Amino acid sequence: MTFEQEVRTGQRFEFGKNWSRFLRVLNEERIAQAQESLKQALAATGFEGKTFLDAGSGSGLLSLAARRMGARVTSFDYDPQCVACTTELRRRFFPEDSAWRVSRGSVLDESYLESLGPFDVVYSWGVLHHTGEMWKSMENVSRRVAPGGLLYISIYNDQGSWSKRWRTLKKIYNRLPSILRIPYAFVVLGLRELRYFLVALLTGHPGRYFRTWTNYRSRGMNYWNDLIDWIGGYPFEVARPEEVFEFLTQRGFRLKKLKTIGGGSGCNEYVFEKPSGAA
């Protein structure tokens, strides 16, 4: 089944359509925040002389951040509009740059990934759990890490029954007629945001809630676009930290850093290292 058929039948969310709207608000402050997120996540001040694979580039913002930090970047995505977003950022900031390649591809396409070669850093934020075959995609991207290189992934935390309910909410969103999706998002997300606001109000810190809408999000993202991504992101899979740890350590990787969501909703973040002597 093609991407277009999956979208038409409600089996896939159009991430690129959401992120194309995000590009309208992209500015230098957001780019700086994205660069800072890479520095913190990978404990690096720069990537001079390093190769960087952005597997599922989305808006292209983190590819741009890595290129500004000196990496030779390869970006790809399965969603055509995500490819267009990433291409647009390259056009704006690094026109005709041979050190930043952008193409369309899938993390499930082994031959495509093999054609890209190995990389010093393989980065994939919030992508693998939206492929419909999370473990296969994790296997595939892990093979792109060069010996001595790093693999950074973020995967939705498994919350048991709540994750199953959230999957149903996402499925409903994608099967609704387009005209009903935003009203549906307002209802579902509105209840969630109201709870957050009341907690902030009752604890005497309402300003903290409002700052979630006005401050730049982690990685330079936008709160509203993140929310739409959250309600619409489908296919949808989850994993417990110990499952991801076991899967990749069995393949020779060493865990360097783990940032969990503390049992809540959202993504756990992992940085694994491939030993220098590994094949």
Image: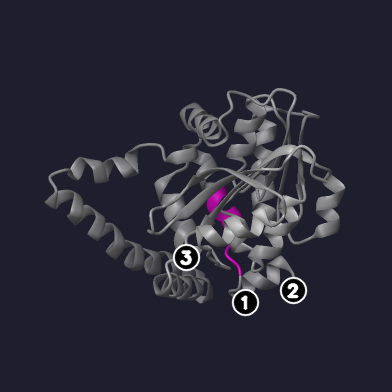
Does the magenta stretch mainly form a helix, a strand or a loop? helix
Q: Residue at x 64, y 50 (%)?
A: 82
Task: Classify residue 213 by image quadrant.
Answer: top left
- Cα distance in 3D space between marks 3 and 1: 26 Å
Q: Residues within 10 Å of mark 3 (few under 14, many from 20)?
A: many
Mark 2 = which residue?
Answer: 1
Q: Does residue 1 appear left or right of residue 126 in this picture?
A: right
Amino acid bearing label 2? Met
Q: Residue at x 46, y 59 (%)?
A: 230
Where is residue 65 drawn, in percent x and y? 60, 32
Q: Please say whether residue 15 is one of the residues in the magenta stretch.
A: yes
Of the residues tagged 2 and 1, which is closer to the observer?
Answer: 2
Q: Position of residue 142 (x, y in %)?
A: 72, 51
Residue under label 3, please give it.
Answer: 158
Label 2: how many residues lie within 10 Å, few (<14), some (14-19) or many (20+)? few
The answer to whether marks 2 and 1 mark residues whose Cβ atoms lie closer than 8 Å is yes
How far is the residue under mark 2 from the one under mark 3? 28 Å
Could you tell me residue 94's position as x and y percent?
70, 27
Asked which secondary structure carries label 3, the reply is loop
Q: Residue at x 53, y 37 (%)?
A: 41
Closer-to-camera residue (18/264): 264
Q: Quadrant of the N terminus?
A: bottom right
On screen, residue 187 above or below 87: below
Give yes or no for residue 99 being in the magenta stretch: no
Task: Looking at the image, tell me whether mark 3 or mark 1 is earlier in sequence order.
Answer: 1
Q: Which residues are magenta?
A: 12-20
Q: Is residue 113 left or right of residue 25?
A: right
Q: Secondary structure at mark 1?
A: loop
Q: Report the disc number at residue 9.
A: 1
Kind of residue sitting beneath label 3: Asp
Give the Cα distance between marks 2 and 1: 10 Å
Number of labelled discs? 3
